[in-house]
Amino acid sequence: MKKISSLLLCAATVLSLASCKKSEVKGDAFDCIVKTSEVTENSVKVSVEVNDAAAEYSLWVVEESAYKEAVPETAKKLKGNAAEVFEGLNADTEYLAVVYEPSFGFSKKGFVTSKPSMVYPCLQGSDYIIISMDETTIKKIEKKIKYFMPADGVYGEPNTGTLFFDWWNGGEAGTASGPNFFGVVADWFSVKTASGWFGYAFRLAEGLTDEEKAESAKRREVLKGITADYTLHIAMKGTAVGDYSLGMLDGATITIGDEKAAYGFKRDGEWHEIEIPVSAFMAGEKYDASTAVNVLQWTQGTNGYPTTLDVDAIFWYKK
């Protein structure tokens, strides 16, 4: 009997969280259903469905530990069905969405905000020019994006689109599965080769159609606007030993070594970020944003021969 009673108590608790809780009922003219959705670490969407479109009621969100049966001055005054977004909440905290209508009393719906997400310093800058970034992360910085130029072209004869990912000398697609650099399950650029030399590049094509040519021209102007105060951000991972050589717009090449190098990453199969000031590429005599075809280019370095390239989170930004 004790086990049955415990189970019934648990079931009752679950049901109470999924519906309105009446703390004081003074009549049956008004009724409501309160729902929460789109819960993040600092916001929530609260939807209220009522049976009386003319009835006025108050809606607010409060930490459960601070709840009192009193309508705060900040409560939203509403009428009819409504959906309101509340922001500025604390992460990983128990909250109540509360409705008050004089003839009905107080109705409460509990929810818990998401745990705080990792803060990436590389997302705290401005003027982002992006080649590769997942949609979830893009939404977090969308107001700070200057231009998005994904590799949407297809390599061939002739090359289509405006920017495409190209490889030479026996390369083939690798496996891009699992979380990317930002912890989101999304694709990234992955290639592998078993030959004695490799080259991988994001190349700017002129395009075939008038629309592609216009877009290519826009992207060329954006590249010309990448000044010395920008930083190139890339994320790489792998286990193959050996250096990479990274170039930008025909400028100076930068060696990408292991974790001990000025620019490099530990070969442990985990994601690591690499940030290089654009001024380092501009130091090369042939740097030319006006005519260079290879926007970014990877080849093997002088120390060893890595057989794979996994790269994500490719963008320029101002710190």
Image: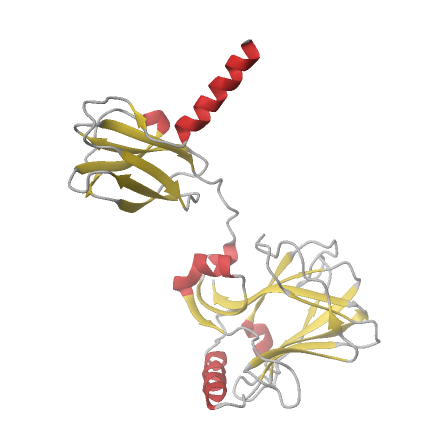
Residue 156 position (above or below residue 229): below
Would residue 33 be visible to someone looking at this image?
A: yes
Left or right? Give the position of 154 relative to 106: right
Left or right? Give the position of 265 relative to 314: right
Nearest to the observer: residue 240 or residue 109 = 109
Name the residue rendered at 79%, 68% in the picture: 307
Left or right? Give the position of 293 relative to 195: left
Furthest residue in direction top, as rendered: 1
Residue 75 position (above or below residue 221): above
Displayed quadrant of residue 142: bottom left
Displayed quadrant of residue 305: bottom right
Residue 191 position (above or below residue 43): below
Residue 207 position (above or below residue 184): below
Nearest to the observer: residue 197 or residue 17 = 17
Name the residue rendered at 43%, 67% in the picture: 145
Coordinates of residue 60 in the picture (x, y in percent) = 27, 37
Coordinates of residue 195 in the picture (x, y in percent) = 83, 75
Nearest to the observer: residue 26 or residue 291 = 26
Name the residue rendered at 73%, 55% in the picture: 269
Coordinates of residue 123 in the picture (x, y in percent) = 48, 58
Which image quarter holds the N terminus? top right
Would residue 74 be visible to someone looking at this image?
A: no
